Every structure is written in C-alpha cells, then in structure tokens.
Image (cartoon, helix red, strand yellow):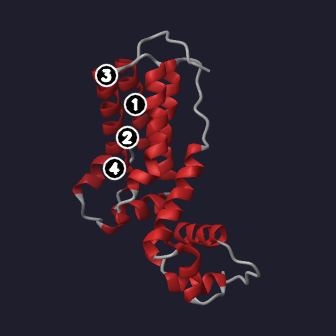
C-alpha cells in the first residue's frame, strides 16, 4: 500500500506505522518498511520520528489516546467501575497487534496508563480510599491481566498445548465480564450513585 505523500508530517508517519502494525503485525514495523509504505527514503522517517524506539512510543501513545476517548458509562458507581475495567480489557483485545507491540517493547504501561487512571478515578468517586482502593485496583487488574493472558495467547502456534483444550469453547469475554462484575460488587458499595 505505497502512497505518495506530498507533505509528510510526524502524525502521518505515526498513522501509517500504526496501520502497518494492525495489518501485518509488530514484526512488520521497520524504518525501511515504513519508508516504502510512505514512498520516501528511510532518512526521512528518522527525521520525522527519530529512532525506532521513538516511533514505537508514538504509535503506542496514539493508541492510548484513542482508547482514552471511550466514554465510561453507567448510572451507578458499580456500573461505571465495571465499564472502566472492561475498557482496559477490550482496548487490549480489539487491536491485538498494538498490544503485542507494546508488550514486546516494554511500553504496555504507556498503552494502558490512562485507562487505569480512569479506573482509579471511578473507584475514588465510589468512595474508596487507602487500602480499600488499593485492594480494589489490584483485584480488578488481576482479573483483567489474567483474562488478557488467556485471550491473547496464540494457540495456533502451539497446537499440542493442553491448556488450549481447557479453554476451547469458552466465551472468555463473557467470563471476564462476569468475573469483573463479581469483583466490582465485592469492592464497591451498593446503591452508590455515579458522579455524572
């Protein structure tokens, strides 16, 4: 998908890099390949974004911004906390290639920081403070992380993996939602109205 760009800017380079990762996976993201996609020389890519590490950070940051735009919904504090927790899970699953890129490059924290901050904000709005807040955040993130490990795991590359048989036929999205709902109900007081 080479395209001729008359006036290239940093945002365009990051956009095309993101699209390349989504289309072909993290391994496809090289400065040379990106230059080919944009129909420019490799030095032009370096001039616009710096190093490959800076490019990866920019792609991850762009995805983090997109994820942070998702509205948190719900009439009660429990509903809003659940919504915030599900945004973390869904955001990582929906565009797995970006999640994989962030994982491979140690930038997962950048990818999810805003969503995790939104979760903490909703828990604080529900009245949780101190140890209760810490316990709730840890419990929710353990469920999200565990679900992501199972959901994002590449069974196709390990057909003899016995764990695959354990989870085949299981609706992990529904299981994650149900488990998160139970954890939220354990930590967030009932009948608390949302702040919105």
Q: Nearer the viewer, residue 67 or 7?
A: 7
Q: Nearer the viewer, residue 179 or 83?
A: 83
Residue 80 coordinates in the image, percent (x, y): 53, 26
Residue neighbourhood size for the residue with mark 3, other residues' Cα within 10 Å, grouped as few (<14), some (14–19), many (≥20):
few
Find out whether the residues at labels 2 and 1 contact each other: C-beta distance under 8 Å: yes
CA–CA distance between discs 2 and 1? 8 Å
User: Is 177 positioned to the left or the right of 139 in the image?
Assistant: right
Note whether 158 is above or below 124 in the view shown: below
Note whether 33 is above or below 86 in the view shown: below
CA–CA distance between discs 3 and 4? 31 Å
Which circle marks residue 84 in the picture? Answer: none
Find out whether the residues at labels 1 and 4 contact each other: C-beta distance under 8 Å: no
Discs 3/4, front: 3
User: Is 5 positioned to the left or the right of 182 in the image?
Assistant: right
SS type, badge 4 = helix
SS type, badge 3 = helix
Residue 88 coordinates in the image, percent (x, y): 46, 42
Task: Identify the mark nearer the N-term, 4 or 2.
Answer: 2
SS type, badge 1 = helix
- Which residue matches tag 1? 180
Residue sitting at x 63%, y 70% = 10
- Which residue matches tag 2? 144
- Which residue matches tag 3? 130
Task: Identify the mark nearer the N-term, 3 or 1.
Answer: 3
Residue 93 coordinates in the image, percent (x, y): 47, 51
Residue sitting at x 33%, y 37% = 143
Task: Identify the mark nearer the N-term, 3 or 4.
Answer: 3
Residue 42 coordinates in the image, percent (x, y): 55, 88
CA–CA distance between discs 4 and 2? 10 Å
Which circle marks residue 150 in the picture? Answer: 4
């Amino acid at each position: 998908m080479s395209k001729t760009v008359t006036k290239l800017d940093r945002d365009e380079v990051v956009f095309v890099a993101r699209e390349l990762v989504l289309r072909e996976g993290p391994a496809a993201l090289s400065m040379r390949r990106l230059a080919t996609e944009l129909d420019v020389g490799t030095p032009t890519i370096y001039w616009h974004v710096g190093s490959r590490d800076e490019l990866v950070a920019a792609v991850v940051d762009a995805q983090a911004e997109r994820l942070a735009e998702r509205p948190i919904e719900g009439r009660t504090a429990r509903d809003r906390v659940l919504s915030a927790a599900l945004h973390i899970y869904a955001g990582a699953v929906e565009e797995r290639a970006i999640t994989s890129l962030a994982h491979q490059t140690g930038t997962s924290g950048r990818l999810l920081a805003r969503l995790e901050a939104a979760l903490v904000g909703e828990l604080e709005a529900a009245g949780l403070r101190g140890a209760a807040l810490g316990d709730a955040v840890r419990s929710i993130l353990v469920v999200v992380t565990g679900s992501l490990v199972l959901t994002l795991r590449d069974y196709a590359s390990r057909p003899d993996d016995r764990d695959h048989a354990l989870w085949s036929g299981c609706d992990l999205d529904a299981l994650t939602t149900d488990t998160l709902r139970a954890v939220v109900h354990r930590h967030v007081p009932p009948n608390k109205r949302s702040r919105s």
